Image (spheres, rainbow, N blue to C red):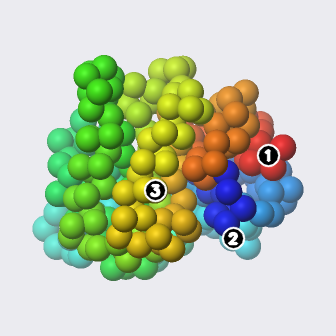
Amino acid sequence: MSPVRPAFVAGNWKMNGALATNAALLEKLRAGLSVCKTMEVAVFPPFPYLDQAARLLSGATLALGAQDVSIHAAGAYTGEVAATMLVEFGCRHALVGHSERRSLHQETDALVAQKFGAAQAAGLIPVLCLGETLAERQVGETLTVVMRQLEAVLARYGVHSLANAVLAYEPVWAIGAGRTATPEAAQAVHLALRQQVALRDAAIAEKLRIVYGGSVKADNAAQLFAAPDIDGALVGGAALNADEFLAICRAVNP
Ligand code: 13P
């Protein structure tokens, strides 16, 4: 974590939630987050609950994000949700290229880049997810994969698009596995990503938040956040428990 970059901690609820449990969770987060003033915290509920979350978070410091976004503005795209719709429902961020979208919905680097552009064009801050599979890591392909995923966006929208975006390094093998990357292994990838961006624009690289995701919990967050290029976390399972998520937020300023 570096003082030049305010930490970003986000809870990706994935396909979890219900009106009653969301209300209880958001109420606890709202009450507990008055203590975290030097960072940004966001929640990413499923689409149908964005309206509920926006109402419950009204006036709170917690931001709202969506888990995905369409590349299209409007039209005959059954099941898709446009970026402008997300803005109308109070979203500030949108995840693009989460590994579950890439693997379960065959999203390609090119499609993810288009989603990044669609989100940004509507005024959303894209959170671009990058990460290698276990098989790719085992053959030493980690950096090749994450750089390819990053380059798809840089080639299309240029380095300036990263001035208003967040990167989330989420090694696929660490997601939901109870197995997290060591702070050293994650730091090495975060630093490499920042250096890659710095080749094009050092100032943008310095300010770019690169958060880590993959089995982040209250008991490993502080060690991860101690690494200089880890600027926060994208939290899955642990974001569904208010006490656990709040403890992760507090680990930013131990
Ligand atoms: P877990 O924290 O459950 O491993 O999920 C990480 C993730 O995919 C967040 O987007």
Badge 3 is on which residue? 194
Exactly how many numbered labels are in the figure?
Answer: 3
* View extreme (left): residue: 76
Q: Residue at x 24, y 49 (%)?
A: 148
The residue under label 2 is which amino acid type?
A: Ser
Distance Cα–Cα, label 2 vs label 3:
34 Å
What residue type is disc 1 on?
Arg
Q: Residue at x 52, y 20 (%)?
A: 179
Tell me if residue 34 can be seen. Answer: yes
Distance from label 3 to label 1 (Cα)? Answer: 25 Å
Tag 1, which secondary structure?
helix
Task: Specify whether 221 is left or right of 198.
Answer: right
Q: Which residue is mark 1?
A: 250
Relative horizontal placement of residue 20, taking residue 96 as reference (left or right): right
Does label 2 or label 1 sit earlier along the sequence?
A: 2
CA distance for labels 2 and 1? 22 Å
- Say which residue appears at 52% left-offset and 70% top-offset: 92
Any part of residue 125 in sight: no
Q: Is label 3 in a helix, a strand or a loop?
A: helix
Q: Secondary structure at mark 2?
A: loop
Q: Position of residue 129 (x, y in %)?
A: 39, 49
Q: What is the quadrant of the C terminus in the image? A: top right
Instruction: Looking at the picture, tell me which residue is in the foreground, 202 or 114.
Output: 202
Q: Amino acid at mark 3?
A: Arg
Q: Which residue is mark 2?
A: 58
**Residue mark closest to the camera, 3 vs 1:** 3
Query: Residue 219: percent from the left, percent from the top?
Result: 73, 27
Residue 206 sits in quarter = bottom right
User: Mark 2 against mark 1, which lies toward the viewer?
Assistant: 1
Tell me what residue is drawn at x 54 percent, y 59 percent: 209
